[in-house]
Image: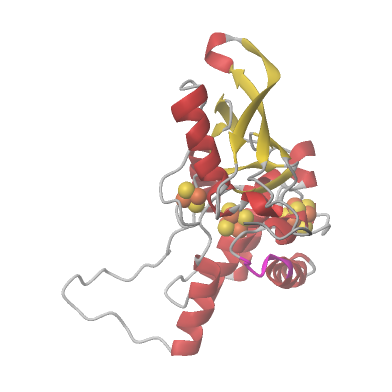
Amino acid sequence: MLKKNTPPAAGPRILTLRVLRSSPSEATEPHWQDFRVEEAEGMTLFIALNEVRENLDPSLQFDFVCRAGICGSCGMLIDGKPGLACCALTRDYGPEITLAPLPVFELIGDLSVNTGKWMRGTAERLETWIHSDAEPLLTALEPRMEPELAEAIYELDRCIECGCCVAGCGTLRMREEFVGAIGLNKIARFRLDPRDERSDEDFYELIGDDTGVFGCMSLLGCHDVCPKGLPLQTQIAFLRRKMAVVGLK
Ligand code: SF4
Ligand code: SF4
Ligand code: FES
């Protein structure tokens, strides 16, 4: 029995997910649609959206694979800010949460965008693979690498290609050829790697203009929204200095 002055236990919140819906293939005009779900302990937006799809509207489109912040599939605008829906706890938000697809990328429908197409185009353009004239010896042991250097490369390799930095970048809204923080981070990663024989002059050819490191306005929206906490700010500043040295030669 409740004591006289004990307030009644608060029930679970009813959340309103306000989702920007659209379907380019069916030429549906973008419109907001509200879905109400009961919040549960430890609920993430992944769980909430699945409840919507299972119980309210099976046509709702969104992407998830790992549900653990690893695959990079579930990026979306959450209350206007790019983030991973599988890592977003509903308790960190108000009772009304707006969800919209990441801008910049090709829209597939509702909250689903084609990040892969953009990532592939950028990777091809920046040639984000090891460039070496050495003959590959498939049976030989890989050359040793100092642990500190391997760690430094791994730190930049943690990017999950979620696209949040791309969606948070003001320059990319104005200049669609801009390679974004993810592109610059990848150059920084291959520049560190001693197996890649490219010189700074070679990297300058790839990013030494305003579609590369000199187009970045340094407002650091990318750094603020990266869910993996990559050191984008320091990498961009470092690359800019290195590329400026080449440009001034
Ligand atoms: S700092 Fe550069 S790359 Fe990052 S969001 Fe701003 S313009 Fe884009
Ligand atoms: S740098 Fe960060 S925000 Fe950008 S794609 Fe990689 S993990 Fe996502
Ligand atoms: S589902 Fe893989 S990062 Fe969110």
- Name the residue at 76% across, 38% down: 173
Image location of residue 30, percent across then percent down:
68, 18
Residue shown at the point (40%, 86%) measured from the top left = 145
Q: In this rendering, does residue 72 appear at all?
A: no
Residue occupying the point 61% across, 62% down: 185
Residue 37 in the image: state x and y as whole percent. Answer: 59, 34
In this picture, which residue range is highlighted in magenta?
Answer: 229-233
Residue 218 spot, x, y in % from top left:
82, 59
Position of residue 47 relative to residue 151, above or below, is above
Q: Main secondary structure of the magenta part?
A: loop
Q: Quadrant of the N terminus?
A: bottom right
Say which of 125 and 36 sits in front. 36
Q: Is residue 8 above or below residue 172?
A: below
x, y (%) of residue 142? 28, 79
Which residue is nearer to you in this view: 3 or 244?
3
Q: Quadrant of residue 138?
A: bottom left
